[in-house]
Image (tube, helix red, strand yellow):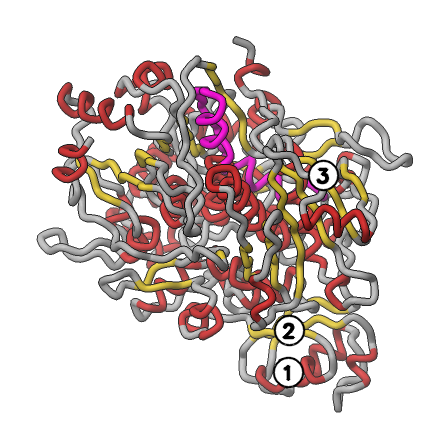
Amino acid sequence: MSSTARNSVRGGLLEGVELVQLYPASTDPMSACEPAWRALRIASRVAGSLGAQLFVHGDPPRDGNAFYQLDETVLTQSALDDWIVGRGRTATSCRVALAASAPTTTKDRHAHPAHCSRVLLELEPWHTEETLFANSGIAHLLGDPEREPLVPAGSYAGHTLGYAVLAALIALCLKQRRFSQTDTAIVPGAGVLAWVNWKAAVAAAQGKEIGRRGQRAEWPVVECADGHVALVYTERDWQSLVEWVDHPALKREELATFRGRLDNREAYVGVLREFFRDKTKAELSTVFLDRAIPAAPVLTLSDLAGDPLLLHRGALEPASALPEDLTDAVVVPRVPHRIAREVPHSVHVADSSPAEEPGLPLRGIRVLDFGIITAGAGVSALLADLGAEVLKIESEARPDPFRGWAGAAEKDKAGDAPVFMSNNRNKLGLALDLKSESGKRTFFELVKSADVVLENFRRGVLDRLGLTFDALRAVNPTILLASISGQGLDGPGARHTTFGSTLEANSGFADLTRYESDAPVISGRNLNYPDQIVCLYGAAIVMAAVADCRERGIARHVDVSQRDCALFQLGDAIAHVSAGGADQPAAIRGLSRRSRLSRIVACYDGRYVALTAASEDVAKRIDGLESLDPASLERWASEQASETVVQCFLDAGGGATLSRVGSELLNDIALWSRQVFARSPNGSLVKGFPFQFSDSPMTVWGDSPAVGEHTRQLVETS
């Protein structure tokens, strides 16, 4: 089979879905909220690629960027009214409306017509990339502790909200298709970014504040001959790096551990800088792969078009709808998943009959979960929240490595790491030795009653265990195998071990996260941005694919790439560069229709505040502030307490928020009320939900399981 066939992107997973985007009138303050309209556009773009029919009402901002040009039908007010009440609706059609509004506590936000579900994205009208990154605490993790927090150039906040909107709308579609029930999903815009930054809140609950480390970060970014390289490694990988560099300064015993490298950073980073200075990105990519070191060159937007793996995956494609002044050379990213294989079968699985009481969309779906750490386990956690029965499969000899991360109890005592608990609550624990014949027999018995097998192992592990797609479909002809991988299933370098920070480097994120003229920045273990956003996108695609497998009698292997998820969030920037635009961070920031002011400034008390203003009129309403020009603003803010700066801007009609730390997220009543954070039954702090339903709310009903906690129960009943 050709690589093109292997990596096809199948439309049709949302066939029969009608999606209308509702944009406010130009006089409505929400019309200027850039992250909101970008979120609706990116969610609609993915839905359209999956076969949904797109409609639009109102006037979405049109900036001429090819990434946001969609094949859609404009609805007049009367046509919209007919659409909402179900006129012209076929028996099999599913209708979902997308809208954005300011946060409200009124009950009418939960209302939805009988024939239409609704996704409501709630944001303050003044929210920007800067205020969302600051308010969520993500900015506090990026940059140098002696300087202002960093916000990446581009539209990462808006597009991450788009992934949450996408997951919510597919969940609603599934609920309509399976149970003939409509619902409203509320997406708390600022809460989604805090949900992405859940590690900061979990750390705060353990009495630790995590923050940016700048030049003292564990994983340094150093210059190479034609740019920069991000050096990412664990203890095992460190030894491979030491053998390659072969310098006595790196062989010191104290550098063999994570803590030792942090405490003695300056003793070895200079050696690494000198070693990498004369090596090219292409040369380094080859060596990192050969030596299994999860480091990566920092790719610019211009570099992406020539990357061998992205070329193999067809990750960039010609824009389908172009303004007249653009040429065929303009490209945009393809959606971040591929259908690796699908095999039709004559068997069709009867789904649940409509229920009298509202239920969660994945009720009755069984998931066999091999997901580990964040990327895989986080996807399956959201599936569990949405109603699936998720069986977490481990072995006593090889449990999920996240169990032993920071905060875990000593080995001779019970107690898993807090980060493990967040990604594994609402699951059942099953212990199987898949290297034994009895373990495999038990597993394949479970496959017969399962709908999904989900994994994010290193490439080749499933094959070595004999758990191939063909083996799975032999016992279940409508099984969905969902592979959540760093860079896809095949192609040059696909088997390269990666972490989230590796993918920040080779997807464009790191190059766009930097102070002017300084080195790029990766987030490190405290965030790993691609690990978090794949949880939203991966869960959305698994939901869409599993329903299609059941209805059409198909076995399918879905490939979701974390790198592609990060790449897709740069769609507007990639279109700009391919049309001849500059690829520097300053140019990418200029793509946004930003307010007169949107920046982070330092205050008298040492805190940082993200400020936004639509016009100079805001400055005129603030005593002592001459203008919004940088010098004037910074001088004024440096003489004020941070809380004063925030209040002055809000009172003057602008927007403002502190650049928050983990403890402030943990103690935020609004985040708890929106269930962005939650408590499991044993009282442990865990991450909550990126959206919530009005009729059938998600809950955290179960603690994370011990290894094999429910094995006897599950094996005896399967």
Snapshot quadrant of residue 2: top right
Q: Residues within 10 Å of mark 2 (few under 14, many from 20)?
A: many
Q: Quadrant of residue 158?
A: bottom right
Q: Closer to us: mark 1 or mark 2?
A: 1
Identify the residue under disc 1: 645
Q: Which mark is residue 88?
A: 3
**Between marks 2 and 3, how big is the CA–CA gap?**
53 Å
Q: Quick check: is 564 in the magenta stretch? A: yes
Residue for point 30% across, 42% down: 235
Mark found first going from the N terminus, 2 or 3: 3
Write down the residue under mark 2.
Answer: 601
- Dot placed on the residue nearer the N-terminal end, 1 or 3: 3
| Magenta-colored span | 544-573
Q: Are marks 1 and 2 in contact (CB under 8 Å)?
A: yes
- Amino acid carrying label 1: it is Val
**Which of these two is toward me, 83 or 684?**
83
Q: Secondary structure at mark 2?
A: strand
**Residue 192, image x, y percentages:** 52, 58
| Residue 673 point in image, percent of width and height | 45, 70
Secondary-structure class at tag 1: helix
**Which SS class for mark 3?**
loop
Between residues 704 and 181, which one lies in front from this camera angle? 181
- What's under tag 2, amino acid-wise? Val
Q: Is residue 501 visible?
A: no
Which residue is at a point 25% across and 55% down the rendered structure image?
703
